[in-house]
Image (tube, rainbow, N blue to C red):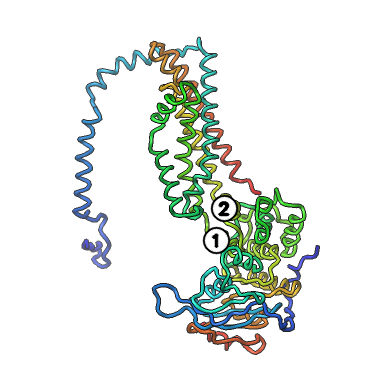
Amino acid sequence: MTSLASPLLQQPVFSEPSTVSSLQVQGLTKRFQGTTAPVFRNVCFNIYKGQSVALIGANGAGKSTLLRCCVRLIEPDEGNILLSGETLSSKRGRELKRARNRVGFVFQKHCLVPRLSALTNVLHGNLAHRSGPRNWSQCWARQADRDRALHYLDLVGLADLWHKRCDQLSGGQAQRVAIARALMQEPSILFADEPTASLDPKSGQVIMELFARLSRAQNLTLFFVSHHVDHALHYADRIIGLRDSELQLDAASGTENTVSLRGFYA
Amino acid sequence: MPEAQLSNDGKAPFPPRFQRPGWLSTALFALFLGFFLWSLAGAGMSIRELVNGLPNIATIAGEMFPPSTDRAGPIMAAILVTFQMALVGTVIGVILSIPMALLAGRNTSPHPLVRHVARSIISFLRTVPDLAWALFFVVSVGLGPFAGTLTIIVDTIGFCGRFFAEAMEEVDPGPSEALDSIGTSPLDRIAVVQIPGALPSMINTSLFSLEKAVRSSVVLGLVGAGGIGAELAASMEMFRYDQAAYIILMIFILVYAVEHLSSRLRERLMHQSQ
Protein backbone atom coordinates (compact mmCIF):
# COMPACT_ATOMS: atom_id res chain seq x y z
CA MET A 1 0.00 0.00 0.00
CA THR A 2 1.30 3.47 -0.75
CA SER A 3 0.85 6.23 1.71
CA LEU A 4 -0.37 9.60 0.47
CA ALA A 5 0.59 11.28 3.71
CA SER A 6 4.15 12.01 2.57
CA PRO A 7 5.84 13.93 1.10
CA LEU A 8 3.44 16.50 2.50
CA LEU A 9 4.49 19.94 1.55
CA GLN A 10 3.99 20.16 -2.19
CA GLN A 11 1.91 22.55 -4.21
CA PRO A 12 -1.55 21.04 -4.80
CA VAL A 13 -2.65 20.67 -8.41
CA PHE A 14 -6.19 21.92 -8.86
CA SER A 15 -8.65 19.78 -10.72
CA GLU A 16 -10.34 20.83 -13.93
CA PRO A 17 -13.90 21.94 -13.19
CA SER A 18 -16.45 19.16 -13.71
CA THR A 19 -19.97 19.80 -14.95
CA VAL A 20 -21.56 17.20 -12.68
CA SER A 21 -23.01 18.81 -9.59
CA SER A 22 -22.21 17.31 -6.18
CA LEU A 23 -24.03 19.80 -4.00
CA GLN A 24 -26.55 22.45 -4.99
CA VAL A 25 -27.78 24.90 -2.38
CA GLN A 26 -30.74 27.04 -3.44
CA GLY A 27 -32.05 29.97 -1.39
CA LEU A 28 -31.06 28.59 1.99
CA THR A 29 -32.17 30.68 5.02
CA LYS A 30 -31.77 29.91 8.69
CA ARG A 31 -33.01 31.77 11.76
CA PHE A 32 -32.49 30.60 15.32
CA GLN A 33 -35.37 30.82 17.77
CA GLY A 34 -35.45 34.05 19.76
CA THR A 35 -33.41 36.02 17.23
CA THR A 36 -34.81 38.39 14.63
CA ALA A 37 -31.86 38.50 12.24
CA PRO A 38 -31.22 35.35 10.21
CA VAL A 39 -27.88 33.56 10.56
CA PHE A 40 -27.82 33.63 6.76
CA ARG A 41 -30.42 34.28 4.08
CA ASN A 42 -30.96 33.26 0.48
CA VAL A 43 -27.66 31.45 0.15
CA CYS A 44 -27.14 29.87 -3.27
CA PHE A 45 -24.11 28.01 -4.59
CA ASN A 46 -23.21 24.96 -6.59
CA ILE A 47 -20.26 22.63 -5.96
CA TYR A 48 -19.13 20.40 -8.81
CA LYS A 49 -17.75 16.91 -8.54
CA GLY A 50 -14.08 16.81 -7.66
CA GLN A 51 -14.02 20.49 -6.70
CA SER A 52 -12.44 21.72 -3.49
CA VAL A 53 -14.38 24.64 -2.00
CA ALA A 54 -13.49 26.69 1.07
CA LEU A 55 -16.13 28.51 3.11
CA ILE A 56 -14.79 31.53 4.98
CA GLY A 57 -16.27 34.11 7.32
CA ALA A 58 -15.82 35.68 10.74
CA ASN A 59 -16.79 33.98 14.01
CA GLY A 60 -20.57 33.76 14.25
CA ALA A 61 -21.03 34.34 10.51
CA GLY A 62 -22.89 31.02 10.27
CA LYS A 63 -20.30 28.85 8.50
CA SER A 64 -20.73 25.76 10.68
CA THR A 65 -24.51 26.22 10.66
CA LEU A 66 -24.49 26.40 6.85
CA LEU A 67 -22.37 23.25 6.64
CA ARG A 68 -24.74 21.39 8.98
CA CYS A 69 -27.79 22.69 7.13
CA CYS A 70 -26.38 21.15 3.93
CA VAL A 71 -26.94 17.67 5.40
CA ARG A 72 -29.86 18.77 7.58
CA LEU A 73 -28.09 18.10 10.85
CA ILE A 74 -29.63 21.53 11.47
CA GLU A 75 -32.93 22.11 9.69
CA PRO A 76 -32.91 25.18 7.41
CA ASP A 77 -36.01 27.42 7.47
CA GLU A 78 -36.19 27.93 3.73
CA GLY A 79 -34.45 26.72 0.62
CA ASN A 80 -33.56 23.56 -1.18
CA ILE A 81 -30.55 21.22 -1.08
CA LEU A 82 -29.65 18.82 -3.86
CA LEU A 83 -27.05 16.17 -3.14
CA SER A 84 -25.75 14.56 -6.34
CA GLY A 85 -28.92 15.80 -8.04
CA GLU A 86 -31.22 14.27 -5.39
CA THR A 87 -33.40 16.62 -3.33
CA LEU A 88 -32.55 16.34 0.34
CA SER A 89 -35.16 18.78 1.64
CA SER A 90 -38.15 16.44 1.25
CA LYS A 91 -36.50 13.33 2.70
CA ARG A 92 -37.47 11.93 6.07
CA GLY A 93 -36.31 9.08 8.32
CA ARG A 94 -34.49 6.26 6.55
CA GLU A 95 -34.45 8.06 3.20
CA LEU A 96 -32.62 10.98 4.81
CA LYS A 97 -30.15 8.62 6.52
CA ARG A 98 -29.52 6.85 3.22
CA ALA A 99 -28.80 10.20 1.56
CA ARG A 100 -26.47 11.22 4.39
CA ASN A 101 -24.36 8.10 4.09
CA ARG A 102 -22.79 9.53 0.93
CA VAL A 103 -21.53 12.56 2.86
CA GLY A 104 -18.36 12.25 4.91
CA PHE A 105 -18.03 14.72 7.78
CA VAL A 106 -14.85 15.75 9.57
CA PHE A 107 -15.39 17.96 12.61
CA GLN A 108 -13.29 20.59 14.34
CA LYS A 109 -12.70 18.16 17.19
CA HIS A 110 -12.04 14.70 15.83
CA CYS A 111 -15.17 13.19 17.47
CA LEU A 112 -13.65 9.72 17.77
CA VAL A 113 -14.62 7.24 20.48
CA PRO A 114 -11.68 7.75 22.85
CA ARG A 115 -11.46 4.29 24.42
CA LEU A 116 -11.52 2.40 21.14
CA SER A 117 -8.58 1.68 18.86
CA ALA A 118 -7.80 3.68 15.72
CA LEU A 119 -8.78 0.69 13.55
CA THR A 120 -12.17 0.25 15.23
CA ASN A 121 -12.88 3.98 14.89
CA VAL A 122 -12.08 3.84 11.17
CA LEU A 123 -14.30 0.77 10.81
CA HIS A 124 -17.22 2.80 12.21
CA GLY A 125 -17.30 4.67 8.88
CA ASN A 126 -18.80 1.45 7.48
CA LEU A 127 -21.88 1.96 9.69
CA ALA A 128 -23.10 4.47 7.12
CA HIS A 129 -23.85 1.54 4.80
CA ARG A 130 -24.08 -1.52 7.01
CA SER A 131 -25.61 -1.68 10.45
CA GLY A 132 -24.90 -4.33 13.08
CA PRO A 133 -22.35 -5.85 15.45
CA ARG A 134 -19.84 -6.78 12.73
CA ASN A 135 -19.10 -3.08 12.29
CA TRP A 136 -19.01 -2.23 15.99
CA SER A 137 -15.49 -3.47 16.63
CA GLN A 138 -12.53 -4.60 14.54
CA CYS A 139 -12.55 -7.82 16.62
CA TRP A 140 -15.73 -9.03 14.94
CA ALA A 141 -15.43 -7.30 11.56
CA ARG A 142 -15.31 -9.11 8.21
CA GLN A 143 -11.77 -9.54 6.96
CA ALA A 144 -12.51 -7.46 3.84
CA ASP A 145 -13.70 -4.56 6.01
CA ARG A 146 -10.67 -4.84 8.31
CA ASP A 147 -8.41 -4.74 5.25
CA ARG A 148 -10.19 -1.68 3.92
CA ALA A 149 -10.02 0.10 7.29
CA LEU A 150 -6.30 -0.63 7.50
CA HIS A 151 -5.86 0.61 3.94
CA TYR A 152 -7.44 3.99 4.82
CA LEU A 153 -5.33 4.21 7.97
CA ASP A 154 -2.34 3.64 5.71
CA LEU A 155 -3.53 6.39 3.37
CA VAL A 156 -3.42 8.86 6.25
CA GLY A 157 -0.04 7.47 7.35
CA LEU A 158 -1.15 5.77 10.56
CA ALA A 159 -1.25 2.05 9.70
CA ASP A 160 1.42 1.39 12.34
CA LEU A 161 -0.78 2.86 15.05
CA TRP A 162 -3.91 0.81 14.25
CA HIS A 163 -3.97 -0.68 17.76
CA LYS A 164 -3.57 2.62 19.64
CA ARG A 165 -6.48 3.92 21.63
CA CYS A 166 -7.65 7.24 20.21
CA ASP A 167 -7.21 9.02 23.54
CA GLN A 168 -3.52 8.15 23.29
CA LEU A 169 -3.05 9.84 19.90
CA SER A 170 -1.95 13.43 19.34
CA GLY A 171 -4.49 15.97 18.06
CA GLY A 172 -3.10 15.75 14.51
CA GLN A 173 -3.07 11.94 14.52
CA ALA A 174 -6.63 11.80 15.86
CA GLN A 175 -7.79 14.16 13.10
CA ARG A 176 -6.13 11.89 10.52
CA VAL A 177 -8.01 8.90 11.99
CA ALA A 178 -11.22 10.95 11.66
CA ILE A 179 -10.38 11.53 7.98
CA ALA A 180 -9.73 7.80 7.52
CA ARG A 181 -13.12 7.09 9.11
CA ALA A 182 -14.77 9.48 6.67
CA LEU A 183 -12.97 7.79 3.74
CA MET A 184 -14.05 4.33 4.98
CA GLN A 185 -17.55 5.52 4.27
CA GLU A 186 -16.54 5.99 0.60
CA PRO A 187 -18.35 9.32 0.39
CA SER A 188 -19.06 11.24 -2.78
CA ILE A 189 -18.52 14.54 -0.93
CA LEU A 190 -16.46 15.31 2.15
CA PHE A 191 -17.42 18.12 4.53
CA ALA A 192 -14.84 19.45 6.99
CA ASP A 193 -15.78 21.94 9.67
CA GLU A 194 -12.62 23.84 10.65
CA PRO A 195 -10.60 20.62 10.69
CA THR A 196 -7.41 22.41 11.71
CA ALA A 197 -8.83 24.74 14.36
CA SER A 198 -7.59 22.72 17.33
CA LEU A 199 -4.19 21.92 15.80
CA ASP A 200 -0.86 23.73 15.75
CA PRO A 201 0.07 25.40 12.42
CA LYS A 202 2.32 22.56 11.25
CA SER A 203 -0.19 19.80 12.04
CA GLY A 204 -2.90 21.94 10.45
CA GLN A 205 -0.87 22.19 7.26
CA VAL A 206 -0.31 18.42 7.25
CA ILE A 207 -4.05 17.83 7.55
CA MET A 208 -4.93 20.29 4.79
CA GLU A 209 -2.27 18.80 2.53
CA LEU A 210 -3.76 15.38 3.19
CA PHE A 211 -7.24 16.63 2.27
CA ALA A 212 -5.94 18.13 -0.97
CA ARG A 213 -4.10 14.94 -1.96
CA LEU A 214 -6.97 12.61 -1.11
CA SER A 215 -9.45 14.81 -2.85
CA ARG A 216 -7.30 14.73 -5.99
CA ALA A 217 -6.42 11.03 -5.82
CA GLN A 218 -10.01 9.89 -5.24
CA ASN A 219 -11.75 12.63 -7.25
CA LEU A 220 -13.51 13.53 -4.03
CA THR A 221 -15.54 16.72 -3.68
CA LEU A 222 -14.30 18.70 -0.68
CA PHE A 223 -16.23 21.43 1.10
CA PHE A 224 -14.36 22.84 4.07
CA VAL A 225 -14.75 25.68 6.54
CA SER A 226 -11.57 27.49 7.46
CA HIS A 227 -10.42 30.51 9.42
CA HIS A 228 -7.06 30.35 7.68
CA VAL A 229 -7.08 32.56 4.62
CA ASP A 230 -3.85 30.87 3.51
CA HIS A 231 -5.49 27.44 3.63
CA ALA A 232 -8.42 28.69 1.59
CA LEU A 233 -6.13 30.21 -1.04
CA HIS A 234 -3.75 27.29 -1.15
CA TYR A 235 -5.98 24.24 -0.91
CA ALA A 236 -9.30 25.28 -2.46
CA ASP A 237 -10.25 25.61 -6.13
CA ARG A 238 -12.95 28.04 -5.13
CA ILE A 239 -13.74 30.22 -2.13
CA ILE A 240 -17.14 31.29 -0.90
CA GLY A 241 -17.55 33.81 1.91
CA LEU A 242 -20.34 34.63 4.37
CA ARG A 243 -20.65 38.16 5.70
CA ASP A 244 -23.62 40.08 7.15
CA SER A 245 -25.84 36.99 6.78
CA GLU A 246 -25.25 36.80 3.03
CA LEU A 247 -23.00 34.98 0.64
CA GLN A 248 -20.83 37.88 -0.49
CA LEU A 249 -18.05 36.00 -2.21
CA ASP A 250 -17.98 33.16 -4.72
CA ALA A 251 -14.77 33.18 -6.72
CA ALA A 252 -11.96 30.97 -7.98
CA SER A 253 -9.14 30.96 -5.44
CA GLY A 254 -6.67 32.12 -8.08
CA THR A 255 -8.49 35.45 -8.46
CA GLU A 256 -8.35 36.29 -4.74
CA ASN A 257 -5.53 37.32 -2.46
CA THR A 258 -4.86 37.40 1.28
CA VAL A 259 -5.69 41.10 1.62
CA SER A 260 -9.08 40.84 -0.12
CA LEU A 261 -10.07 37.82 1.97
CA ARG A 262 -9.04 39.40 5.27
CA GLY A 263 -11.98 41.77 4.77
CA PHE A 264 -14.26 38.87 5.71
CA TYR A 265 -12.75 38.90 9.20
CA ALA A 266 -12.97 42.64 9.75
CA MET B 1 -21.70 44.43 51.04
CA PRO B 2 -19.03 44.12 53.75
CA GLU B 3 -16.65 47.03 54.11
CA ALA B 4 -13.09 46.46 52.95
CA GLN B 5 -10.47 47.05 55.63
CA LEU B 6 -7.37 49.11 55.06
CA SER B 7 -4.01 47.38 55.18
CA ASN B 8 -1.38 48.43 57.74
CA ASP B 9 0.25 51.01 55.49
CA GLY B 10 -3.14 52.57 54.86
CA LYS B 11 -2.90 52.31 51.08
CA ALA B 12 -4.43 49.26 49.46
CA PRO B 13 -7.76 48.00 50.81
CA PHE B 14 -8.10 44.26 51.18
CA PRO B 15 -11.20 42.11 51.60
CA PRO B 16 -12.42 40.90 55.02
CA ARG B 17 -11.54 37.33 56.07
CA PHE B 18 -15.16 36.37 56.72
CA GLN B 19 -18.50 37.52 55.45
CA ARG B 20 -21.46 37.91 57.78
CA PRO B 21 -24.03 35.19 56.92
CA GLY B 22 -27.47 36.29 55.74
CA TRP B 23 -30.52 35.97 58.00
CA LEU B 24 -31.84 33.01 55.98
CA SER B 25 -28.61 31.01 56.39
CA THR B 26 -28.56 31.80 60.13
CA ALA B 27 -32.21 30.74 60.53
CA LEU B 28 -31.64 27.50 58.58
CA PHE B 29 -28.55 26.69 60.65
CA ALA B 30 -30.45 27.33 63.91
CA LEU B 31 -33.29 25.12 62.65
CA PHE B 32 -30.88 22.32 61.77
CA LEU B 33 -29.13 22.60 65.16
CA GLY B 34 -32.47 22.44 67.03
CA PHE B 35 -33.61 19.41 65.03
CA PHE B 36 -30.28 17.66 65.58
CA LEU B 37 -30.47 18.15 69.39
CA TRP B 38 -34.04 16.82 69.37
CA SER B 39 -32.87 13.86 67.22
CA LEU B 40 -30.23 12.99 69.83
CA ALA B 41 -33.06 12.28 72.27
CA GLY B 42 -35.08 10.46 69.56
CA ALA B 43 -32.11 8.25 68.70
CA GLY B 44 -31.90 7.15 72.35
CA MET B 45 -28.35 8.47 72.81
CA SER B 46 -27.38 7.92 76.42
CA ILE B 47 -23.90 8.14 77.91
CA ARG B 48 -25.14 6.49 81.12
CA GLU B 49 -26.42 3.40 79.30
CA LEU B 50 -23.20 3.21 77.34
CA VAL B 51 -21.15 3.28 80.56
CA ASN B 52 -23.45 0.68 82.16
CA GLY B 53 -23.09 -1.54 79.09
CA LEU B 54 -19.28 -1.41 79.03
CA PRO B 55 -18.84 -4.47 81.33
CA ASN B 56 -21.15 -6.49 79.03
CA ILE B 57 -19.18 -5.38 76.00
CA ALA B 58 -15.98 -6.45 77.73
CA THR B 59 -17.50 -9.83 78.72
CA ILE B 60 -18.77 -10.60 75.21
CA ALA B 61 -15.53 -9.43 73.62
CA GLY B 62 -13.61 -11.64 76.07
CA GLU B 63 -15.76 -14.65 75.18
CA MET B 64 -15.12 -14.05 71.51
CA PHE B 65 -11.43 -14.86 71.88
CA PRO B 66 -10.04 -17.15 70.80
CA PRO B 67 -12.47 -17.63 67.88
CA SER B 68 -13.79 -21.18 67.70
CA THR B 69 -13.13 -23.27 64.59
CA ASP B 70 -15.23 -26.27 65.66
CA ARG B 71 -17.81 -25.59 62.94
CA ALA B 72 -15.30 -24.40 60.35
CA GLY B 73 -16.63 -26.73 57.60
CA PRO B 74 -20.29 -25.63 57.61
CA ILE B 75 -19.23 -21.99 58.13
CA MET B 76 -16.90 -22.07 55.11
CA ALA B 77 -19.71 -23.68 53.04
CA ALA B 78 -22.06 -20.85 54.13
CA ILE B 79 -19.39 -18.25 53.25
CA LEU B 80 -19.09 -19.79 49.78
CA VAL B 81 -22.88 -19.72 49.32
CA THR B 82 -22.87 -16.06 50.42
CA PHE B 83 -20.30 -15.20 47.77
CA GLN B 84 -22.13 -17.25 45.12
CA MET B 85 -25.39 -15.41 45.90
CA ALA B 86 -23.62 -12.07 45.61
CA LEU B 87 -21.85 -12.99 42.37
CA VAL B 88 -24.87 -14.48 40.58
CA GLY B 89 -27.17 -11.72 41.83
CA THR B 90 -24.76 -8.98 40.73
CA VAL B 91 -24.00 -10.44 37.28
CA ILE B 92 -27.70 -10.97 36.46
CA GLY B 93 -28.57 -7.59 37.98
CA VAL B 94 -25.88 -5.79 35.93
CA ILE B 95 -27.05 -7.48 32.71
CA LEU B 96 -30.66 -6.47 33.39
CA SER B 97 -29.56 -2.94 34.35
CA ILE B 98 -28.19 -2.20 30.87
CA PRO B 99 -31.56 -2.24 29.01
CA MET B 100 -33.16 -0.42 31.96
CA ALA B 101 -30.46 2.27 31.80
CA LEU B 102 -30.85 2.61 28.03
CA LEU B 103 -34.58 3.17 28.46
CA ALA B 104 -33.93 5.65 31.31
CA GLY B 105 -31.09 7.67 29.72
CA ARG B 106 -31.92 11.10 28.27
CA ASN B 107 -29.85 10.48 25.13
CA THR B 108 -30.72 6.80 24.68
CA SER B 109 -34.41 6.48 25.54
CA PRO B 110 -36.78 6.10 22.56
CA HIS B 111 -39.44 8.40 24.11
CA PRO B 112 -39.71 10.78 27.11
CA LEU B 113 -42.65 8.76 28.47
CA VAL B 114 -40.61 5.52 28.33
CA ARG B 115 -37.75 7.34 30.07
CA HIS B 116 -40.05 8.56 32.83
CA VAL B 117 -41.51 5.07 33.43
CA ALA B 118 -38.05 3.41 33.39
CA ARG B 119 -36.68 6.01 35.84
CA SER B 120 -39.65 5.52 38.16
CA ILE B 121 -39.16 1.73 38.20
CA ILE B 122 -35.44 2.11 38.91
CA SER B 123 -36.15 4.61 41.72
CA PHE B 124 -38.71 2.25 43.26
CA LEU B 125 -36.30 -0.72 43.16
CA ARG B 126 -33.59 1.43 44.75
CA THR B 127 -35.60 3.11 47.48
CA VAL B 128 -37.18 -0.06 48.94
CA PRO B 129 -34.53 -1.42 51.39
CA ASP B 130 -32.93 -4.78 50.59
CA LEU B 131 -34.20 -6.30 53.84
CA ALA B 132 -37.77 -5.49 52.78
CA TRP B 133 -37.11 -7.16 49.39
CA ALA B 134 -35.59 -10.16 51.20
CA LEU B 135 -38.68 -10.56 53.42
CA PHE B 136 -40.88 -10.30 50.33
CA PHE B 137 -38.91 -12.96 48.43
CA VAL B 138 -38.64 -15.29 51.46
CA VAL B 139 -42.42 -15.25 51.67
CA SER B 140 -42.74 -15.65 47.87
CA VAL B 141 -40.17 -18.34 47.04
CA GLY B 142 -39.34 -19.76 50.48
CA LEU B 143 -36.33 -19.70 52.78
CA GLY B 144 -32.88 -20.12 51.29
CA PRO B 145 -30.29 -18.55 48.98
CA PHE B 146 -32.66 -18.14 46.01
CA ALA B 147 -34.61 -15.48 47.91
CA GLY B 148 -31.33 -13.74 48.73
CA THR B 149 -30.16 -13.90 45.12
CA LEU B 150 -33.44 -12.40 43.89
CA THR B 151 -33.03 -9.62 46.45
CA ILE B 152 -29.53 -8.84 45.19
CA ILE B 153 -30.72 -8.83 41.55
CA VAL B 154 -33.44 -6.28 42.35
CA ASP B 155 -31.10 -4.18 44.49
CA THR B 156 -28.43 -4.21 41.76
CA ILE B 157 -30.91 -3.06 39.08
CA GLY B 158 -31.91 -0.16 41.34
CA PHE B 159 -28.29 0.79 41.96
CA CYS B 160 -26.68 0.12 38.55
CA GLY B 161 -29.70 1.22 36.47
CA ARG B 162 -29.43 4.75 37.78
CA PHE B 163 -25.65 5.06 37.54
CA PHE B 164 -25.43 3.40 34.11
CA ALA B 165 -28.06 5.83 32.77
CA GLU B 166 -26.19 8.82 34.22
CA ALA B 167 -22.88 7.55 32.83
CA MET B 168 -24.40 7.27 29.34
CA GLU B 169 -25.85 10.77 29.62
CA GLU B 170 -22.41 12.17 30.45
CA VAL B 171 -20.71 10.66 27.38
CA ASP B 172 -19.24 13.30 25.04
CA PRO B 173 -21.93 13.96 22.36
CA GLY B 174 -19.29 14.64 19.64
CA PRO B 175 -18.78 11.05 18.40
CA SER B 176 -22.53 10.49 18.46
CA GLU B 177 -23.08 13.60 16.31
CA ALA B 178 -20.33 12.43 13.94
CA LEU B 179 -22.05 9.08 13.42
CA ASP B 180 -25.47 10.72 13.20
CA SER B 181 -24.16 12.90 10.39
CA ILE B 182 -23.46 9.81 8.27
CA GLY B 183 -26.86 8.23 8.92
CA THR B 184 -26.08 5.45 11.41
CA SER B 185 -28.91 3.80 13.36
CA PRO B 186 -29.58 4.65 17.03
CA LEU B 187 -28.70 1.06 18.04
CA ASP B 188 -25.31 1.34 16.33
CA ARG B 189 -24.65 4.68 18.04
CA ILE B 190 -25.51 3.19 21.44
CA ALA B 191 -23.24 0.19 20.79
CA VAL B 192 -20.21 2.08 19.51
CA VAL B 193 -20.41 5.42 21.33
CA GLN B 194 -22.64 5.35 24.41
CA ILE B 195 -21.63 1.99 25.87
CA PRO B 196 -17.85 2.25 25.23
CA GLY B 197 -17.94 5.86 26.48
CA ALA B 198 -19.74 4.89 29.67
CA LEU B 199 -17.80 1.63 30.13
CA PRO B 200 -15.22 2.84 32.70
CA SER B 201 -17.99 4.20 34.88
CA MET B 202 -20.12 1.08 34.31
CA ILE B 203 -17.25 -1.22 35.31
CA ASN B 204 -16.66 0.86 38.44
CA THR B 205 -20.32 0.79 39.36
CA SER B 206 -20.59 -2.98 38.72
CA LEU B 207 -17.60 -3.75 40.93
CA PHE B 208 -18.91 -1.47 43.70
CA SER B 209 -22.20 -3.25 43.29
CA LEU B 210 -20.48 -6.62 43.81
CA GLU B 211 -18.81 -5.32 46.98
CA LYS B 212 -22.16 -3.96 48.16
CA ALA B 213 -23.87 -7.27 47.34
CA VAL B 214 -21.31 -9.27 49.34
CA ARG B 215 -21.89 -7.06 52.40
CA SER B 216 -25.63 -7.11 51.88
CA SER B 217 -25.80 -10.92 51.41
CA VAL B 218 -24.29 -11.32 54.87
CA VAL B 219 -27.22 -9.46 56.41
CA LEU B 220 -29.85 -11.15 54.22
CA GLY B 221 -29.27 -14.45 56.02
CA LEU B 222 -30.64 -12.86 59.22
CA VAL B 223 -34.13 -12.91 57.68
CA GLY B 224 -33.76 -16.40 56.23
CA ALA B 225 -32.55 -15.51 52.75
CA GLY B 226 -29.57 -17.91 52.87
CA GLY B 227 -25.85 -17.44 53.36
CA ILE B 228 -23.63 -16.79 56.36
CA GLY B 229 -26.05 -14.42 58.09
CA ALA B 230 -28.15 -17.36 59.32
CA GLU B 231 -25.06 -18.97 60.91
CA LEU B 232 -24.14 -15.68 62.60
CA ALA B 233 -27.64 -15.21 63.98
CA ALA B 234 -27.70 -18.79 65.30
CA SER B 235 -24.30 -18.43 67.02
CA MET B 236 -25.33 -15.14 68.70
CA GLU B 237 -28.67 -16.61 69.84
CA MET B 238 -26.88 -19.65 71.36
CA PHE B 239 -24.35 -17.33 73.12
CA ARG B 240 -21.51 -18.96 71.12
CA TYR B 241 -19.60 -15.69 70.82
CA ASP B 242 -16.36 -17.53 70.00
CA GLN B 243 -18.09 -19.09 66.98
CA ALA B 244 -19.59 -15.71 66.07
CA ALA B 245 -16.08 -14.21 66.18
CA TYR B 246 -14.87 -16.83 63.71
CA ILE B 247 -17.80 -16.04 61.39
CA ILE B 248 -17.13 -12.28 61.62
CA LEU B 249 -13.46 -12.93 60.82
CA MET B 250 -14.43 -15.01 57.76
CA ILE B 251 -16.85 -12.28 56.64
CA PHE B 252 -14.07 -9.70 56.98
CA ILE B 253 -11.71 -11.85 54.87
CA LEU B 254 -14.40 -12.37 52.20
CA VAL B 255 -15.29 -8.65 51.97
CA TYR B 256 -11.64 -7.59 52.00
CA ALA B 257 -10.74 -10.15 49.29
CA VAL B 258 -13.63 -9.03 47.06
CA GLU B 259 -12.74 -5.34 47.49
CA HIS B 260 -9.07 -6.01 46.78
CA LEU B 261 -9.77 -8.18 43.72
CA SER B 262 -12.34 -5.74 42.34
CA SER B 263 -9.93 -2.81 42.55
CA ARG B 264 -7.21 -4.85 40.77
CA LEU B 265 -9.70 -5.93 38.10
CA ARG B 266 -10.89 -2.34 37.69
CA GLU B 267 -7.34 -1.15 36.98
CA ARG B 268 -6.75 -3.89 34.39
CA LEU B 269 -10.02 -3.37 32.53
CA MET B 270 -9.58 0.42 32.38
CA HIS B 271 -6.48 0.13 30.23
CA GLN B 272 -7.71 -2.30 27.60
CA SER B 273 -8.86 -1.22 24.14
CA GLN B 274 -10.58 -2.89 21.23
Circle 1 is placed at which residue position?
B174
At 20% from the left and 35% from the top, the residue drawn is: B38
Quadrant of the rendered image containing residue A125 = bottom right
Q: Which mark is residue B190?
A: 2
Q: Amino acid at mark 1?
A: Gly
Secondary element under disc 1, as helix, strand or loop, is helix
| Residues at marks 1 and 2 on the same chain | yes
Q: Amino acid at mark 2?
A: Ile
The vertical placement of B57 against B135, above or below, is above
Quadrant of the rendered image containing residue A49 = bottom right
- Seen from the viewer's position, the closer of residues B197 and B128 is B128
At 46% from the left and 50% from the top, the residue drawn is: B114
* Chain ID at mark 2: B
- Seen from the viewer's position, the closer of residues B171 and A206 is B171
Residue A229: percent from the left, percent from the top? 59, 81
* Chain ID at mark 1: B
At 51% from the left and 24% from the top, the residue drawn is: B82
